[in-house]
Amino acid sequence: MGVLRVVTFLFLVSCVWSSYGLCGTKPAEVPKAKTIAELAARYDSSSCQECHEEAYEQWENSVHAVSMLGVTLRTAPTILTAVDKGLKLFPYSGVKEDKDITVEHLMFCAKCHLPQLDEATDDVAREIVKTIRDWQKAYADDDDDLIDELEEKIASLNIGCMVCHNKVAIIHKWQDGYPQPDTVYGALEGEHDDPAYPKMAKAPAMSESIFCGQCHGEGPNFELDQPSQCATLYGTYLFTYIPEGGHDSCQECHMAKCGLGHDMQAYRDETMIKMALDIEVDAMAHFWRKNKAEGIIPLGVVKVEMFNKCGHAIPDG
């Protein structure tokens, strides 16, 4: 009888322990990527194209596909600004020259623009900075071939399919377990026809706004030694839109209602702009007689009012 009680007690403890997700296994340690090429290959989205052609084409046109380069080619130079006007001027960063840069130093940008950088060595962080500098020099030298080559290299570092559908797929890890390296996460469970990711599993929060909030956040990342975050969309969504009775998720507006799917545009898409803003223009023309010498002067008065209809502040980042 005593043994039965002990076994029963251990079973109940095990159930409670499991309910908190503490029995979930963490992913196997992956070797650190030693080059940009190695890191890019690890998260290359091209293998998803054959089966998910429409989603891939949508993603390929998205901002996520050029998260390090930038749609308007602004992101990469801004990373250099963070190095030259930030890291090198911060007295306690330990960075005086590019050779001092580590993965940790770049994470205050890469946490959102390239979260998989934490799977790389410090050499990769320094290679990223050097590549961007070489790219800028190629522009100064009007070396079109080198520009194209280096832009392709920078663009290979992006928020690809497996960043969202594996690396950051699970938010509440003690509750839902840790992402496994052989699994694609989404809305389905079962087998997956890809030798690199032979399993499918559900990611409970992937359709919720909190999933996007991991990068499009509430403000500074206070867990970093140097807190920084450009994006505050999720914060303004939580503290303005939701309290006013709003109920659409980020995915409902930026994927479903606009019809863009994995393209997830904002300021570059006319449909999204119309969904986000009401613009009213009122114009009036009249003639004003200033004096006899100058005669009648035509004047125009234009009144423009813009109303934010979306679920967060505009602009962001």
Image: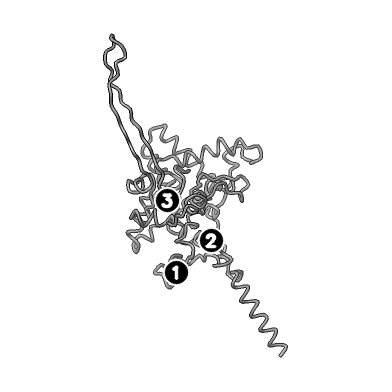
Label 2 packing within 10 angstroms: few (<14), some (14-19), many (20+): some
Residue drawn at (45%, 57%) of the image: 43
Q: Label 1 belongs to which residue?
A: 200
Quadrant position of the N terminus in the picture: bottom right
Query: Among all residues in the image, which is located at the extreme right?
Result: 2
Residue drawn at (59%, 72%) of the image: 19
Left or right, 58 with respect to 115, comes to left
> Whole-Å distance between the Cαs marked 1 and 2?
17 Å
> Whole-Å distance between the Cαs marked 2 and 3?
19 Å
Q: Label 3 belongs to which residue?
A: 64
Residue 85: horizontal and vertical position, in percent? 56, 35
Q: Label 2 belongs to which residue?
A: 171
Kind of element beneath mark 2: loop
Residue 244: horizontal and vertical position, in percent? 47, 52
Callout 1, which amino acid?
Met
Residue 132: horizontal and vertical position, in percent? 47, 40
Q: Is residue 302 above or below residue 128?
A: above
Residue 256: horizontal and vertical position, in percent? 36, 57
Q: Return the residue nearer the eye: 160 or 145.
A: 160
Callout 2, which amino acid?
Ile
Callout 3, which amino acid?
His
